[in-house]
Image (cartoon, rainbow, N blue to C red):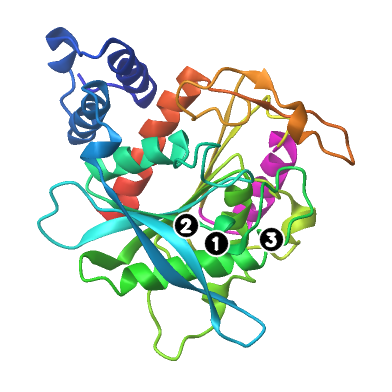
Amino acid sequence: MPVSFVGLARLMGSANRSGRLSFRFARRLTSPLAIALTCFSLAGALGVSGSAFAQEKVSIPSLDVDSNGAPVMIDAYLFRAADASGPTPAVVFMHGCNGMFTRKGKIDTRELDWAHRLNAQGYAVLAVDSFTSRAQPSECTGGGQVRPSVERPRDAYGALRYLQSLPGIRPDRIALMGWSHGGGTVLFSVGPKSPGRVQDAQPAPDFAAAIAFYPGWCNTKAQGADWSTRIPLLILTGADDVWSKAAPCDAFVQDVSARGAPITFHIYPGAVHDFDYPNLPVRNRPEFTNPRTHIVPITGTQPEARDDAIARVTAFLAKVFGT
């Protein structure tokens, strides 16, 4: 009997917490997707570590240019797909407003967790560092120079073109994925003002899909009444997120979906910002208080939402990539 996404997600979460999956439940996972998801969950449960998925630091040209008209070079981290026997699909990561590194200079746990998970599914990952490359600190209280509407979409398309130049990557099977500030970057990147709408001298495939977690600027005022996209887009957000609010995003999505935009949208009841982050306690973040609205963000993991999001992202990418 096939297992539902939600049921499977809970089972995956149980495997992650216990480090094992009982044979009784494993026998019930009969569909190809369920089997694949279980294998990926088991990889995490059995202790997939950073050492098992080495990343390579690379310098890539953004479509952004400096005062001399030369491409801005940005750092990125390439995670190769596990056991690849040929060219693989890939996913470009766009980090949140606090950058992609911890205070100790390590790549953020959320990005690492997703990179390792997607590597195990046979996808390469390129995590783009928009901030450190430009000496930009945290932008979580606003006012930074690296904007989600201008510089960061240019970084996203620079990453796309870089991946398309690699022999081990399928040039027509590359997705864009971002969180919060990076989720807003996704919306700007795939919309009508995207750098991808500018015709290249030698046309190359656009992003095959896009995923935005609790995206900032997910509203009609920020995106414009004429916003549209041809790229399949998955948006996942939390109902209790006071930082990237669900209600204006929901209204925006309903409007553009009615005009034909291929968007899949899901709101998680009880979930706050960073709900997909692994093992992050729910807490107030006064250091990121909005100076204009005085809203204090709340961040933290919501286990059921996280597990369901993993299942949804897995199924979404498998569908658009044809894997």
Q: Position of residue 211 (x, y in %)?
A: 48, 48
- Is 122 or 147 nearer to us in this picture? 147
Q: Is residue 34 above or below residue 314?
A: above
Extreme-right residue of the structure: 292
- Is 57 or 210 nearer to us in this picture? 57
Secondary structure predominantly adopted by residues drawn in magenta: helix
- Is 220 or 299 nearer to us in this picture? 299
Residue shown at the point (20%, 65%) measured from the top left:
168
Task: Give the Cα separation between the discs numbered 1 and 2.
Answer: 9 Å
Dot 2: element: strand
Mark number, residue 133: 1
Q: Which amino acid, mark 1? A: Ser
Extreme-front residue of the structure: 104
Q: Which amino acid, mark 2? A: Val
Task: Give the Cα separation between the discs numbered 3 and 1.
Answer: 14 Å
Say which label, 1 or 2, has the lower sequence index: 2
**Residue 252 in the figure: left or right of residue 175:** right
Mark number, residue 128: 2
Q: Position of residue 64 (x, y in %)?
A: 58, 75
For residue 191, say whether it is visible: no
**Disc 3: which residue:** 147
Highlighted magenta segment, given as a residue range: 244-262
